[in-house]
Structures are given as C-alpha cells and as structure tokens.
Amino acid sequence: MKRAGHSTIEITVNTYGHLMPSLSAGMIEFATTKLNDSWNA
C-alpha cells in the first residue's frame, strides 16, 4: 500500500500529538498498532 505523508504513524503522532492533548497514551498505542498492522498487510 502506498502511503502519503509521514512514513509511520509514530512520526505523525510525535509531530502532531501535542495538538490532541486529550488523547491518552493507550489510545495512541492502540491506533499505532492498528494502523501499522493495516499498512503491513
């Protein structure tokens, strides 16, 4: 699958995470895992 933008969700979260302070670390971890799994499928 071709990706647009950042190469990993971690880069996106590290770059823009401060804009979403209400997100818990657990939610970010869950989203990271799910997105990485879908990109690597």
Image (cartoon, grey):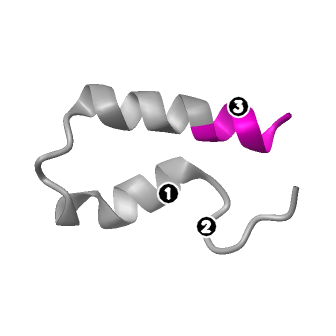
Judge the density around disc 3: few (<14), some (14-19), many (≥20) Cα neighbours within 10 Å. Answer: few
Earlier residue among tags 1 and 3: 1
- Residue annotated with mark 1: 11
Q: Nearer the viewer, residue 31 or 10?
A: 31
Q: Is residue 6 left or right of residue 15?
A: right
* Residue 30 location, quadrant: top left
Magenta-colored segment: predominant secondary structure: helix
Amino acid beneath label 3: Asp
Marks 1/2 in contact by CB < 8 Å: the verdict is yes
Residue drawn at the location 40% of the way across and 30% of the way down: 29
Amino acid beneath label 1: Ile
- Residue annotated with mark 2: 6
Element on which disc 2 rests: loop
Element on which disc 1 rests: helix
Q: Is residue 3 left or right of residue 35?
A: right
Residues drawn in magenta: 35-41
Marks 1/3 in contact by CB < 8 Å: the verdict is no
Give the quarter of the figure containing the N terminus. Answer: bottom right
- Residue annotated with mark 3: 37
Query: Does residue 14 sit above or below 29 in this rendering?
Result: below
Judge the density around disc 1: few (<14), some (14-19), many (≥20) Cα neighbours within 10 Å. Answer: few
Query: Does residue 29 sit above or below 4 in this rendering?
Result: above
Picture coordinates of residue 27 (x, y %)?
32, 32
Measured Cα–Cα span from mark 3 to mark 2: 16 Å
Residue drawn at the location 20% of the way across and 66% of the way down: 19
Judge the density around disc 2: few (<14), some (14-19), many (≥20) Cα neighbours within 10 Å. Answer: few
Q: Which mark is residue 24?
A: none
Give the quarter of the figure containing the C terminus. Answer: top right
Earlier residue among tags 3 and 2: 2
Element on which disc 3 rests: helix
Picture coordinates of residue 18 (x, y %)?
19, 61
* Residue 16 location, quadrant: bottom left
